[in-house]
Amino acid sequence: MAAPGGRDTRARLLDAAVAVLRRAGAQGLTLEAVAAQAGVSKGGLLYHFHSKRELLDALLGRWMDDFQGEIEADPDGFVAGYVRASDGTSGDETALLGAIAADPEALAPVRRRHSAWQDRVADEGGVDATVARLAADGLWLADLLGLAPPRGALREQVLSRLLELATRSASGRAARASGHPT
C-alpha cells in the first residue's frame, strides 16, 4: 500500500518509530505512540507489524541493510566502505539504541550481522583491516553517544589513517593472491 509521496506504509511506520524514539526514548516507544506519529490506527500498525518486537526487528533490519548498502557501494573495498559508512551517524542509530534498550534480546541479529562483517573484514585484510574496523566502530560509538569524538582536522586525519589501513589491507590481499610480496 503506497503512502503519499511514494513511500510505502511500512517505511512510514518505521520512520514514525524512529521519531518516537528520538522524542520519547525507549520507554516512550509504544505501538500507540508510533501509530499516532504515523497518522494511522493501532490496527493499521498491527497489520504491518504484529508486535512491538516485530517493529523493533524491522527497525534494526533496516538500519543494518542501509549500513550494508553503504559498505558494498564503496569502490575501495569492503573495509574502506565499512570505515566510511561508520563515519558519523545517520539518525537511524537512534533506532538501534532504542530497540536494544526496549528489548536487549533484539541485539541478537545485530551480533550475527557484525560477525559476518568481521569475517569479511578478516578475509579482506586480516589484522590491519580488523584494527580499522574496530577503530571505526569506536569513532561511530563516540559520535553516537557524544563521547568526545574528534572534530575538524583531527577527525579528518583519523579517518585518513583508518582508510590507509583499510586500503593497505585490501592491496596486500590482492598482492598475496597474485603471488607478489607486499
Image (cartoon, rainbow, N blue to C red):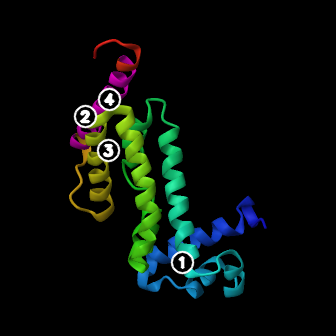
Q: Which mark is residue 169?
A: 4
Q: Main secondary structure of the magenta part?
A: helix
Q: Which residue is mark 2?
A: 161
Q: For the point 25% across and 34% down, which residue is it?
A: 161
Of the image marks 4 and 3, the number of the one nearer the N terminus: 3
Q: Is residue 130 magenta?
A: no
In the rendered structure, which segment of residues is drawn in magenta?
154-175
In front of the other: 133 or 176: 176
**Callouts 1 and 3 close, C-beta under 8 Å:** no
Q: Secondary structure at mark 1?
A: helix
How many other residues sit within 10 Å of disc 1, few (<14), some (14-19) or many (≥20)? some
Q: Is residue 159 magenta?
A: yes
Q: Secondary structure at mark 3?
A: helix
Say which amino acid is labelled 2: Arg
* Quadrant of the image occupied by residue 17: bottom right
Q: In the rendered view of the protein, which quadrant contains the N terminus?
A: bottom right
Q: CA distance from mark 4 to mark 3?
A: 11 Å
How many other residues sit within 10 Å of disc 3, few (<14), some (14-19) or many (≥20)? many
Q: CA distance from mark 1 to mark 3?
A: 29 Å
Q: For the point 24% across and 40% down, which residue is it?
A: 158
Q: Which residue is mark 1?
A: 53
Q: For the point 44% across and 49% down, which residue is it?
A: 116
Any part of residue 25 in sight: no
Say which amino acid is labelled 4: Ser
Of the image marks 1 and 3, the number of the one nearer the N terminus: 1
Q: Which mark is residue 133?
A: 3
How many other residues sit within 10 Å of disc 2, few (<14), some (14-19) or many (≥20)? few
